[in-house]
Amino acid sequence: MHNPFLIGDKVYLRPLEKADAVRCVPWANDPAVTRTLKLFRPLNLQAEEQFIDRTTQSEHSLVLAIAIQATDQHIGNVGFESIDFRTRATAFGIMIGEKTEWGKGYGTEATRLLIQHGFHTLNLNRIWLHVYEYNAAAIHIYQKLGFQREGTLRQDTYRDGRYWDTIVMGLLRPEWEEQFV
């Protein structure tokens, strides 16, 4: 394992390095990957390097690389953004960029690791996310991890020639602890 920060059974989370930008750019420009993300324009290497610099220096963001333990392969990123230390809340996001690694449980484990860190180390009380209505697999995983549907942003995004709803989901620390601690 290269510079592990949070360690699970199959994956570990490590700090993003500027060198990771070379892997991230093709993911950010792949329509199959970005279909579930709020990315609507192409990214180049310089923009990705600047993103990594900004997030690694910000105390209100925590973005980590997801790596497979057995191979050290970087397969995606997971993180918190807009961490609010007054309200103890943050937004969650994840991207598994390596399509060959989809459906293997890596995203679920990475999500679980970061949520645990958020509640038990960062002392957060609420973690929330947005997920598009057509992303049934992600909705299922979030529900399995205890996220509750809090609302709907009706026709909030435009993809594939039509408008789609964005589902707002949230997880409170007592709900997490009741289920996983």
Image: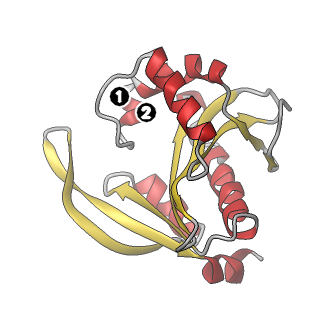
Q: Is residue 172 above or below residue 98?
A: below
Give the labeled residue for mark 2.
33
Which one is nearer the viewer's eye here, 61 or 160? 61
Instruction: Point out which mark residue 31 bears.
Output: 1
Which amino acid, by three-letter code, is at mark 2?
Val
Q: Distance between the residues labelled 2 and 1?
A: 5 Å
Q: Is mark 2 on a helix, strand or loop?
A: helix
x, y (%) of residue 156? 21, 55
Question: In the displayed structure, would residue 104 be above or below residue 178?
Answer: above
Q: How crowded is mark 2: few (under 14 residues within 10 Å), some or many (20 or more)?
A: some
Colour pattern of the rendering = secondary structure
Seen at 69% across and 83% down, the residue is 178
Horizontally, is 130 left or right of 100 in the view? left
Dividing the image into 4 quarters, which one contains the C terminus? bottom right
Q: Which amino acid does label 1 sit on?
A: Pro
Q: Determine the image quadrant of residue 38.
A: top left
130 or 87, nearer to the observer: 87
In the rendered view, would you say 154 is above or below 172?
A: above
